[in-house]
Amino acid sequence: EGIFSRNLRRIHLVNRTGQNKIVELPPHSWIEIHAEPLPERLEGNSYRLAPGQALIYEEAIESPLLILGPADGLLLVMKASFWLSFALTAPIWGWFWLQFIMPGLRAAERSFAIPLLLASFVSLSLGIAFAYFITLPIANQYLLHFNHSIGQNAWTLPHYVNYALLLCMGHGVAAELALILLLAVHFRLLTATSLIAKRRYMIVLA
């Protein structure tokens, strides 16, 4: 708060009816210009306008994110819808993919595949949820203050969504690493001894 420049919207209300009219101003708004006599203020943020009386108020635009191009909003919604539908339908297309490879698996591998698929979906969901509810708010707060110290924050909505998707997918992939290592050990691509030997290097790399 206070880092973005405040964007305001000015609203001009005129009572063109022949009787008194009660209007309720939205929250985070304030009267800028009014006609004489003063409009009668009722409870809360409500006012009574006499016939022909005008009231001009300003309200803050809550979202500080900018849309610079005429088609940016449409393209953004399409992109977000694609990735969201891709993630939500993962169990369906994952099941069809599993049916395709099932005939080539042994009995022991078949019993291992379905739990692995379910665990993979749960891990991906937990990683994305962790990014959305924990990492993203912390990263936003840090980047707002960091950028404010060297320039002006004027984030655009497409750039913000791309950054949020990248962060969520990165967390999702990171949550899958345990399953990837489990598969590598199961198929003897790696051994527990080699993982233990490289543990300190992986911690530094992470």
Image: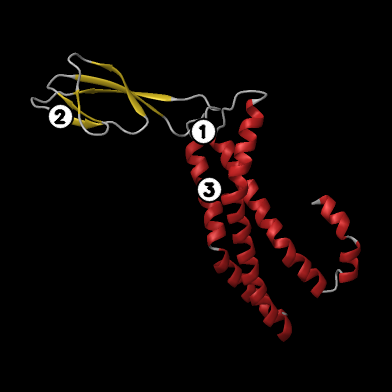
Q: In this view, does 158 lie above or below 186?
A: above
Question: What's the amino acid at mark 3?
Answer: Ala
The structure residue drawn at horizontal position 63% and vertical position 31%, both measured from the top left corner, is 145
SS class, disc 1: loop
Question: What's the amino acid at mark 1?
Answer: Leu
Task: Report the residue marked by disc 3.
Answer: 80
Query: Which is more N-terminal, label 2 or label 1?
Result: 2
In screen coordinates, is 18 left or right of 148?
Answer: left
Give 90 or 7, whichever is nearer the viewer: 7
Give 203 or 184, whichever is nearer the viewer: 203
Question: What's the amino acid at mark 2?
Answer: Lys
Q: In the drawing, what numbered circle is on residue 160?
A: none
Instruction: Give the image location of residue 67, x and y in percent.
Output: 50, 32
Task: Give the CA distance from mark 1 to mark 2.
Answer: 35 Å
Query: Which is more N-terminal, label 1 or label 3?
Result: 1
The structure residue drawn at horizontal position 11% and vertical position 26%, both measured from the top left corner, is 17
Instruction: Give the image location of residue 87, x and y in percent.
Output: 56, 58
